[in-house]
């Protein structure tokens, strides 16, 4: 399972989730069997063209329709900031689903 997280940096220890429009990099998180396999940072989301299952956004007021049209499930954070906090919230189902 692959997950996009827009970030303000490509350094995992320093990166924080950002609004999509402000993203300086994109963290692609690979989960397999409930375990974190890898995190790869991309400068542009378009640099990775395979199927991605989820995108996690900073808040529910961002534009999300393009992601839904690509077949991604859209989730948003509550108070999480760091990439690791966002991943932990995903694992424990503490993110909110965005939609109609």
Image (spheres, rainbow, N blue to C red):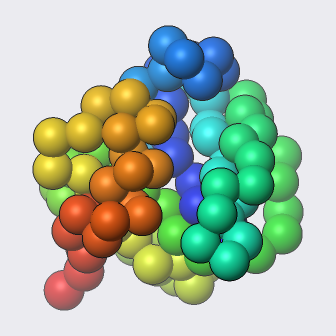
Question: Can you say which quadrant of the picture contains the C terminus?
Answer: bottom left
Give the answer, above or below, for where 47 lies relative to 1: above
- Image quadrant where residue 94 sits: bottom left
Image point (58%, 54%), residue name: 4
Image point (39%, 71%), residue name: 74
Query: Is any atom of residue 22 visible in this view?
Result: no
- The one nearer the camera, 51 or 66, is 51
Question: Can you say which quadrant of the picture contains the N terminus?
Answer: bottom right
Residue 18 spot, x, y in % from top left:
38, 32
Q: On the picture, is 87 further left or further right than 72?
A: left
Query: Is any atom of residue 69 visible in this view?
Result: yes
Residue 37 spot, x, y in % from top left:
75, 55
Residue 8 spot, x, y in % from top left:
48, 21
Q: On the picture, is 62 further left or further right than 4?
A: left
Q: On the picture, is 9 further left or further right than 75?
A: right
Question: How many discs appear?
Answer: 0
Residue 56 spot, x, y in % from top left:
41, 56
Give the answer, above or below, for where 45 lies relative to 30: above
Image point (26%, 63%), residue name: 95
Q: On the picture, is 82 further left or further right than 8?
A: left
Image point (39%, 61%), residue name: 90
- The one nearer the camera, 90 or 15, is 90
Give the answer, above or below, for where 83 lies relative to 2: above
């Amino acid at each position: 399972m692959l997950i996009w997280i827009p970030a303000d940096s490509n350094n995992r220890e320093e990166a924080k989730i950002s609004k999509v429009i402000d993203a300086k990099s994109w963290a692609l998180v690979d989960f397999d069997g409930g375990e974190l396999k890898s995190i790869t940072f991309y400068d542009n989301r378009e640099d990775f063209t395979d199927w991605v299952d989820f995108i996690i956004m900073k808040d529910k007021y961002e534009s999300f329709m393009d992601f839904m049209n690509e077949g991604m499930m859209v989730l948003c954070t509550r108070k999480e900031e760091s990439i690791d906090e966002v991943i932990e919230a995903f694992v424990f189902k503490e993110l909110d689903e965005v939609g109609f």
